[in-house]
Image: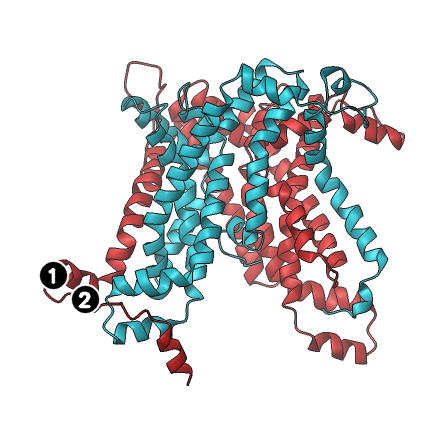
Amino acid sequence: MGNEIRAQKIPAWVTPPRRGSAWSLFVEDHPVLVFTLPAVVVVFILMVFPVFYTVYMSLHSWFASSLTGPEFIGLQNFKRAFTQDERFRNAIWLTLYFTVLATALQLVLGVSLALLLNRPFRGKGFFRSIFLLPMVATPVAIALVWMMMYNPTLGVMNYLVGLVGLGPYTWVSDVHLVIPALAVVDTWEWTPLITLITLAGLATLPLEPYESALIDGATPAQMFWRITLPLLRPTIMVALLFRSIDCLKTFDIIYVMTAGGPGFASETLNVYTFQVGLFYFHIGYACSLLVILFALVLGVSLILIKVRRGSW
Amino acid sequence: MKRSRSGESPWTYILLAVILVPFLFPLFWMFLSSLKSQVENTAFPPVWIFKPTLNNYREVFIRNPFFTFTWNSLVVAAGSTGLALVLGLPGAYAIARFKRTGIALAILTARMAPGIGYLIPWFILFTKMRMIDTYLALILTHLIVALPLVLWVMIGFFEDVPGELIEAARIDGCSNFAAFLRVALPLVKPGIVATAILSFIFSWNNFLFSLIIAGFKTRTLPIAVYNFLSYEEINWGGLTAAATVITLPVLILSLFIQKHIVRGLTFGALKG
């Protein structure tokens, strides 16, 4: 019965392969090769070439503006970054500071909102649509609006915090406030993602543990800490993985809003690398910074994947 | 964790409103400011009630070649999305059907690498080939985002196609290619539409690649708005009008694919 219904879905005009053509026979014999080759070749050219180029260049000294070619200097670029470059150390620290602050904020906020919203209500689809607008909105436009809201003399943020008796602050113009202020923008942008991911995770939770917990007389708080949170852990860890990778690489909003300033107070590794490579054209050094940035992203990912698999 | 229907009380809706307000406020403020005059925009405390004007929009389009920028953005987004689909759909199908997850994992690593890592080598190569400020160079760099996205999101959709359907077609004498083109593709049509819209949005929003690769001729909207920002820091009406023009199409497009956005943003890892 089931097979008959399924068979009907196949269009009648589907024709058998032409046995004579060498090409169609080749496709029959090597479907994976033929189907994936175009994508794999293009990915290889677009992405693998830059990786080799970056690693190669990281061992050289070369200014794109100079007439001479790259000069091999071994690991000198890395040595310079770790031992002499104050701006690099500052950038590493700011990258980690921004990432930890932003991910922690959006994780706590996102999961709490999901728990609050995990109840039946009408218009769930409408709510979702509105809620995901921050993450699809164009980052340049977001950065621009927040710059305006953060304006020290005329911005609406000082007006709003003034209503509760705080401020005025200079926000992104303040050396100490700039990273938290940028983390707030990132949190505004990405909390909805965490909430939606967590809501999807909550929808798949089994009912049985809660039923037996109820029978055993567990309090709601106990159920949350002992059942909901452990069951949600895999979902939350995936969300955390994606957010921390992206936070480490955040570029658009930082570059547009502060370009790394005031001074170097918000110059994360990504922004610093951009300046070294595409502003000073010091390609060799920029490439070694890129290798370090990629190692940082990879390291954080591996730690998170390990934490996800093992016990917490 | 299911709760009883009694959860649907007025409090639920008050709670929803309280949660939505801060997430909507910046977008609302952007739109509101774009309708204000310069005097109203520089008033403190901020003006909430005023007579709306479209002057800012008129000015943005008259004083800047905004139609050209929009056209450039469209060409690059459509070009990179189309190319990514043509290259990525057969690949995603084969990876899902023949379970070649090794290839897929290698491509996921590309998601982790910082964009500047791709940008610097391509910038140097394109400069040598005199391809800076061409549509082709922009489309190729945007493909760095679009192709892995299409592959990963579509693998998930192709995995949902029942294997028996493909088997049945094969038994009826369908070639591998015909089974892909005439059986699998029509079944994942909603997935293709969602993926195409996502890829379009990613390209439309792209700042970093266009900032370096686009020049005077191919300047896309985000770069135009960014330049606008450095020239007229205080003309907030004009700036927010430009920001609204660039954001509105994306917001509208996203409403069509709200079910698939989480899947797209996590590269298919979570179906949301």
Near mark 2 (Cα within 10 A), the count class, few <14, some 14-19 or many ≥20, is some
The amino acid type, in three-letter code, at marker 2 is Pro
Q: Is residue A83 visible?
A: no
Q: Quadrant of residue B162?
A: bottom left
Q: Mark 1 points at which residue?
A: A21
Quadrant of the image for the N terminus of chain A?
bottom left
Check the picture and name the quadrant holding the C terminus of chain A.
bottom right
Query: Is residue A213 shown left or right of residue A299?
Result: right
Taking the spot 80% from the left edge, 77% from the top edge, the residue there is: A214
Mark sitting on residue A42: none
Residue A163, percent from left and from top: 88, 31
The hue of chain A in the figure is red
Q: Is residue A127 above or below residue B53?
A: below
Residues at discs 2 and 1 in contact (Cβ within 8 Å):
yes
Pointer 2 residue: A17
Q: Is mark 2 on a helix, strand or loop?
A: loop
| SS type, badge 1 | loop
Q: Is residue A307 above or below residue A155?
A: below
Residue type of the residue flagged with mark 1: Ser
Pick whichever, B242 or A279, lies toward us: B242
Task: Specify whether A164 is left or right of B243.
Answer: right
Which chain comes out cyan in the rendered image? Answer: B
